[in-house]
Image: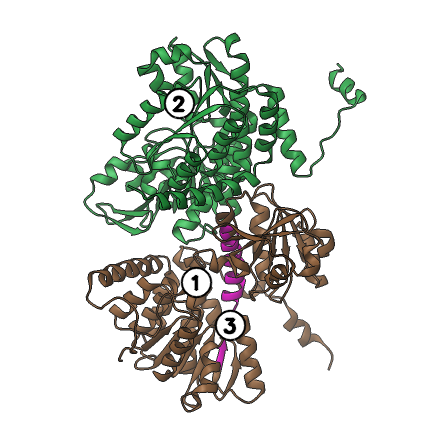
């Protein structure tokens, strides 16, 4: 057990980090002021199930300041102890233990749902799905949920098509204010910088293969290129591939690119995009990591079946292939920016978490008029988020005039 | 060689010591695998036995990359003496691994300025014949405190601009009785180390210390030398809006044509969200510049002196300062918060993991070959630059390691100035 003084110390360190993040979140602060004044989420039970670190902690605190009863869940692997204690010190119920086993995580998730949240803010839709599986009575009383990620929206859409989704869910990820920024600039920057931090190497002059040219892949490719890498993109969709070509990257299949690639960023969110055959074709010293998705994108089962593997550097494990080539995997194939960095930068999370706060408000106000299904964030709310950020950055928007409005409508 | 007494490290043979050795060896091995020039061209050149039995002191930041250079020299038969060039950057595991290989390491991790002074004298007392120096720190101490041993020095290869200036000054004062090489003047050093390595690692450190975003940031670089260029290049490429403060008109014009906004501090600093000092001088951000800064600005130093951001003046102007986060000190000044990274020390060294391995492969190739050149070329006393031929060979070796081969100019491609001269009337 932790001593009281250690808990106080952790809470204080966590509070400092939360306060630093808050400085970079002017939009969330403006929403907080509005929610406090309007009282729109006051008295609502809101469950926050996002990666628990200083930025998301600010969202929980904003909702609490606005009068909601907030409880928080996070898996052990993504939990920062100092943040847990800082939130508890503020009177928020936290169901998260750093380093908890998968079984313990499930137990905590069930306890979290035991607080009977009316609104769930989810990341990966795992809690929404758990609630549907095991807590049908709770689901029947829920107002709705909001989902943060691409990989969470996909199964929810499938659930809805099968008639299994029983609450309205706001797909925060589908907002332009989310995917045009968070996935491109946030994940792109944090994955590429985490690579440099972990390896102490350069990307300048390196052959880098980015698999998948969705929003994350674009961001990773752009930032790697900015740091001097020569980027090749592997992509299933011909239009996205053409776009990669126009962005100045080479386009090739994983199989053809494998022999010359020095660094692979898998950013598809799809299992098995890198196969054991690909790895066997790679050169000695090639480095594999995932950006945005997870270890399922890499042939980890095959690599782990090899006899020889050593940790050659913190966060870097090296597997020796039968032919003698040594292949390095960063962070055991887990998303490099969460496993070996501090996650996305603060500014971009200001946008994404502001959308979550707005989604919570939208559900609190309108859920009784929303049938089960997937909903977008309102366009007006998106505009407000972008405008607030622009204002903070000292940027001025071109004003609409009658003449321009007429010209736009003319035919 | 015997080990200096009074070590504070792990007890030799203990389990902890073995863990340290393993960790240090793993770090050095990682460097080795990304150092094709040192492993290939440099090892090959040193294999002629010219360094056999020579006592060479290596006095550079004592972490894995420096350690690898030391092992290359030792493998070539030299008796290597290793000392850190800064007490804060010495790595315990790396020290343990080098000792396990039989190198004479005089430095300990976790030392302070006083222990560091003692360590440098311990290095001097092991009577090096050649020094690979950083800031000429060991050279000037030997000249002053160990004159007899200094008189027997045969050569120095120096890493930095600061050390180069010191050696020139000593030479001008007739206090340099041996040949010194200035590695920083090699193109394979300053074109890469100062620009790409410092540029990359400065941005890495700023972003890691703050968790802030570079895309959309308004980043001002003060000074457009090699270091300033590298920072501005990478920041702009990652989506920052860049501005440059430079007093040299030619460099300022270059910055302008590189696509950065250019002007005086009074015009460029207001509105900046990140300010990086890279002048190599003092007080690039001082009392006057503080007035131009916005609330919530991040200040970082990538120059040479710890006072490029005048933290003394900041502390004098306000008592209201707090550690906002590890490595971030916030000064509250006239209604604004100014965030200074790493206490104003060099941000990429104090707040980062040092230069990328591949860059140090080039820099240390210059140093390793420099010592070989000193030992074989019989240079007269004074300050010298490594021959262009060696500089070129390092770059060619690196290109060849990546399978890149260059063509050669054919005679008919050459300018025909010789023909013109022949045809000129006498």
Q: Are marks 1 and 3 on the same chain?
A: yes
Q: Residue at x 43, y 65 (%)?
A: B88
Do callouts 2 and 1 mark residues in contact (Cβ within 8 Å)? no
Tell me where residue B188 appears, x and y as whole percent.
Answer: 49, 65
Asked if residue B259 is positioned above or below residue B165 in the image, the reply reads above
**Mark 2 → mark 3, Cα distance in angstroms:** 62 Å
Q: Colour of chain B?
A: brown
Whether residue A169 is visible to the viewer of this picture, yes or no, is yes
**Mark 1 → mark 3, Cα distance in angstroms:** 19 Å
* Chain ID at mark 3: B
Residue reaching furthest to the right:
A403
Q: Is residue A78 magenta?
A: no
* Chain ID at mark 2: A
A396 relative position to B361: left or right:
right
Tell me where residue A86 appears, x and y as whole percent.
Answer: 43, 38
| Residue highlighted by disc 3 | B388
Do callouts 2 and 3 mark residues in contact (Cβ within 8 Å)? no
Q: Which residues are magenta?
A: B180-205
Q: What numbered label is drawn on residue B360? A: 1
Do callouts 1 and 3 mark residues in contact (Cβ within 8 Å)? no
A250 relative position to B83: left or right:
right
A364 relative position to A132: left or right:
right
Helix, strand or loop at mark 2 = loop
Whether residue A244 is visible to the viewer of this picture, yes or no, is no
Helix, strand or loop at mark 3 = helix
Chain seen in green = A
| Residue highlighted by disc 2 | A125
Q: Residues within 10 Å of mark 1 (few under 14, many from 20)?
A: many
Q: Quadrant of the N terminus of chain B?
A: bottom left
């Amino acid at each position: 057990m932790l001593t009281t003084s250690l808990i106080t110390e952790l809470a204080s360190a966590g509070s400092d980090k939360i306060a630093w993040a808050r400085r970079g979140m002017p939009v969330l602060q403006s929403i907080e002021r509005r929610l406090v004044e309007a009282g729109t989420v006051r008295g609502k039970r809101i469950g926050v199930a996002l990666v628990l670190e200083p930025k998301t902690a600010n969202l929980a605190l904003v909702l609490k300041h606005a009068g909601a009863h907030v409880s928080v869940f996070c898996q052990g692997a993504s939990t920062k102890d100092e943040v847990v204690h800082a939130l508890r010190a503020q009177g928020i119920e936290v169901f998260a233990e750093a380093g908890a086993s998968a079984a313990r995580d499930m137990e905590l998730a069930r306890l979290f749902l035991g607080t009977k949240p009316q609104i769930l803010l989810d990341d990966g839709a795992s809690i929404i799905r758990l609630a549907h599986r095991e807590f049908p009575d709770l689901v029947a009383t829920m107002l709705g949920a909001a989902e943060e990620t691409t990989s969470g929206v996909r199964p929810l859409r499938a659930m809805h098509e099968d008639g299994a989704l029983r609450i309205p869910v706001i797909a925060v990820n589908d907002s332009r204010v989310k995917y045009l920024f968070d996935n491109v600039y946030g994940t792109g920057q944090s994955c590429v910088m985490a690579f440099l931090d972990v390896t102490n190497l350069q990307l300048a002059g390196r052959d880098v293969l980015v698999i998948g040219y969705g929003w994350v892949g674009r961001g990773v490719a752009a930032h790697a290129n900015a740091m001097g890498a020569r980027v090749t993109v592997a992509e299933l969709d011909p239009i996205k591939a053409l776009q990669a070509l126009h962005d100045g990257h080479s386009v090739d299949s994983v199989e053809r690119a494998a022999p010359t690639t020095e660094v692979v960023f898998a950013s598809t969110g799809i299992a098995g995009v890198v196969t054991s055959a690909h790895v066997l074709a790679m050169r000695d010293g090639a480095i594999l990591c995932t950006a945005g998705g997870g270890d399922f994108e890499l042939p980890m089962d095959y690599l782990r079946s090899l006899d020889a593997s050593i940790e050659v550097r913190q966060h870097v494990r090296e597997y020796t292939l039968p032919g003698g080539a040594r292949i390095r995997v960063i962070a055991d194939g887990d998303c490099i920016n969460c496993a070996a960095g501090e996650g996305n930068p603060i500014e971009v999370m200001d946008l994404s978490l502001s959308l979550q706060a707005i989604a919570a408000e939208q559900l609190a106000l309108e859920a009784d008029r929303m049938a089960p299904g997937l909903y977008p964030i309102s366009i007006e709310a998106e505009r407000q988020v972008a405008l607030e950020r622009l204002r903070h950055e000292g940027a001025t928007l071109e004003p609409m005039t009658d003449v321009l409005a007429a010209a736009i409508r003319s035919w | 060689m015997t080990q200096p007494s009074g070590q504070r490290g792990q007890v030799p043979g203990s389990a902890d010591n073995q863990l340290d050795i393993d960790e240090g060896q793993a770090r050095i091995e990682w460097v080795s695998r990304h150092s094709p020039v040192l492993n290939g061209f440099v090892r090959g050149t040193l294999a002629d036995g010219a360094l056999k039995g020579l006592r060479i002191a290596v006095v550079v930041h004592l972490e894995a990359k420096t350690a690898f250079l030391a092992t290359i020299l030792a493998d070539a038969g030299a008796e290597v003496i290793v000392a850190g060039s800064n007490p804060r950057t010495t790595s315990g595991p790396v020290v343990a691994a080098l000792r396990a290989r039989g190198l004479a390491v005089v430095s300990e991790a976790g030392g302070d300025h006083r222990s560091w002074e003692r360590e440098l004298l311990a290095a001097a007392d092991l009577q090096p014949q050649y020094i690979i120096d950083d800031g000429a720190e060991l050279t000037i101490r030997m000249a002053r405190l160990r004159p007899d041993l200094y008189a027997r020095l045969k050569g120095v290869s120096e890493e930095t601009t600061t050390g180069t200036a010191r050696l020139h000054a000593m030479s001008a004062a007739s206090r340099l009785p041996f040949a010194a090489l200035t590695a920083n003047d090699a193109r394979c050093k300053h074109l890469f180390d100062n620009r790409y390595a410092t540029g990359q690692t400065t941005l890495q450190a700023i972003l890691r210390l703050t968790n802030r975003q570079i895309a959309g940031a308004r980043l001002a670089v003060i000074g457009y030398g090699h270091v300033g260029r590298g920072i501005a290049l990478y920041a702009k490429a990652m989506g920052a809006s860049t501005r440059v403060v430079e007093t040299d008109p030619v460099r300022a014009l270059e910055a302008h044509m590189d696509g950065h906004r250019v002007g005086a501090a009074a015009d460029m600093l207001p509105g900046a969200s990140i300010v990086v000092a890279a002048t190599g001088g003092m007080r690039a951000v001082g009392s006057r510049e503080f007035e131009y800064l916005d609330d919530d600005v991040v200040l970082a130093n990538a120059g040479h002196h710890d006072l490029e951001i005048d933290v003394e003046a900041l502390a004098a102007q306000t008592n209201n300062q707090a550690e906002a986060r590890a490595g971030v000190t916030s000064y509250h000044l006239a209604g604004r918060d100014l965030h200074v990274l790493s206490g104003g020390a060099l941000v990429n060294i104090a707040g980062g993991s040092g230069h990328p391995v591949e860059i140090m492969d080039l820099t240390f190739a210059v140093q390793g070959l420099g010592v070989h050149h000193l030992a074989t070329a019989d240079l007269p006393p004074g300050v010298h630059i490594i021959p262009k031929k060696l500089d070129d060979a390092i770059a060619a070796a690196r290109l060849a390691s990546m399978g890149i081969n260059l063509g050669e100019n054919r005679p008919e491609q050459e300018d025909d100035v010789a023909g013109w001269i022949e045809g000129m009337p006498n």
